[in-house]
Amino acid sequence: MTEPVDVPGRRIGADPETVQRGLVTLVLTVVELLRQLMERQALRRVEYGDLGDEKVEQIGATLMALDERMRELCDHFGLTAADLNIDLGPLGPLLPPADQELMAA
Amino acid sequence: MSHPVPHTGDGGVQAERIALVDLLDRVLAGGVVITGEIRLSIADIDLVRVSLQALIASVSGGFGETRD
Amino acid sequence: MTECGVWAYAVSAEIGPDRLAGLTGVAGQPVRSVTGDGLAAAVSTVSMAEFGEQPLRRRLEDLAWLGATARAHHQVIEALAPPVVPLRLATIYRDDSNVAALLTQRQADFAAALAELTGRSEWGVKLFVGQSVAPATPAEPDLPGAGPGLSYLRRRQRQLAARDQARQAGAATAQQVHAALGRLAAASQLRPLQSAELTGEVTAMLLNATYLVDDAASARFAEAAATLGRQHGVRVEITGPWPPYSFAVLAPREAAS
């Protein structure tokens, strides 16, 4: 385990495990953001009604598989939906908090 | 003058510490700002920058940083 | 000898020495007053090594330092006899004569602000979604013959719609409560909502607002906030009385000299 680096008021834990966990959280947050955006876009297209039934079924199945995979990944790393969020201060949270209910199920 | 405390509507007062987030919101974004040469140091604090870096780092703790 | 500056906390009409006796401010420094033109500013001498622009910017990003300094700043302001015009955190002057010059130059503005704040305090009100609320996704039987993909999409659509509806209802409540409380206050201000991670709260925040209320009406105000919360089925959190940080405003200056 490496020595903590001293920065005024803040120590950075530079051990590999901590760094990796931070990176995993960051990556999964970005993936979750993309997943939610894609899902919303797909839902709008489906509502608009210009896609064939087969296409709609395909998109739905893909999104469902993606949702399932995200849950598995988070489970594997012991992350909850709350862990995946980033508070942007005055801009609010990155991901809508209500969606946490869906992931927590 | 009494300390700002969480105040229950039925007249009870809980003597808890002021939440830091409430205090910071007021002293960083409130209070009079004076501009002009006679003032030496910054009073126009960039709230976004301060809150993002300081608060995310301390709250999320998921980026390999720990508090002293 | 280290270079020094003067940290200014607030401006008031007069600061009695009894208020300052034994009072400690930022960096553990004693507090004293600088007077000018019928006004008084509460100040502390600080070292520029810690409070000069460069070191200050670094320290402001250290939450531990920022928290301690903010509390010290606040405690001094609270110790003064109201009405008081709080200054923003980190208002630092070269020396006492500059502080005195400030009081003289802006005498009328400070006097006007003090008059506006006399007999009034700031109160914070937050609303949270009630504990019992759990937006249940309306269960609908899947269409016969619908594939798993389509069923999934329909389910998600219902969930998002239910969530949007809940969010709209929350926003409407916040608006109504804010308007009602605003009518009981001399002034009001909406503050940014705080995230659950910051507050540690379980349910979502719907409103974060602050109000300038006559001291004589404060009990009634707090009661009204509690009542409105009950009526709308939301949890209310009230804090106060605060020094009037959010309502301390000096009239805009004419062209600088």
Image: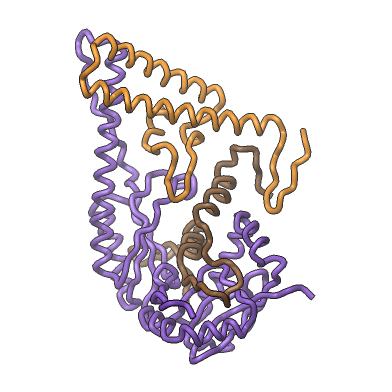
Give me the residue at 55% from left, 88% from top. Answer: C35
C34 relative position to C241: left or right: right
Task: Give the orange chain's letter.
Answer: A
Along the line of sight, the residue nearer the viewer: B35 or C246:
B35
C100 relative position to C183: left or right: right
Give me the residue at 56% from left, 65% from top. Answer: C70
For the image, the number of numbered tags is 0
Give me the residue at 48% from left, 26% from top. Answer: A31
* Residue at the far bottom in the pictured view: C38
Q: Quadrant of residue A97?
A: top left
Give me the residue at 33% from left, 72% from top. Answer: C213
C256 relative position to B38: left or right: left
Q: Quadrant of residue C161?
A: top left
Q: Quadrant of residue C135?
A: top left
Q: Is residue C71 visible?
A: no
Colour displayed for chain B in the image of the structure: brown
A94 relative position to C70: left or right: left
- The image quadrant where one finds the N terminus of chain C is bottom right
Q: Is residue C212 above or below residue A25?
A: below
Along the line of sight, the residue nearer the viewer: C139 or C148:
C148
x and y, in percent, of residue C159 in the image: 29, 29
x and y, in percent, of residue C105 in the image: 49, 85
x and y, in percent, of residue C199 in the image: 47, 50
Colour displayed for chain C in the image of the structure: purple
Along the line of sight, the residue nearer the viewer: B39 or A104:
B39
x and y, in percent, of residue B67 in the image: 65, 48
Q: Is residue B38 visible?
A: yes
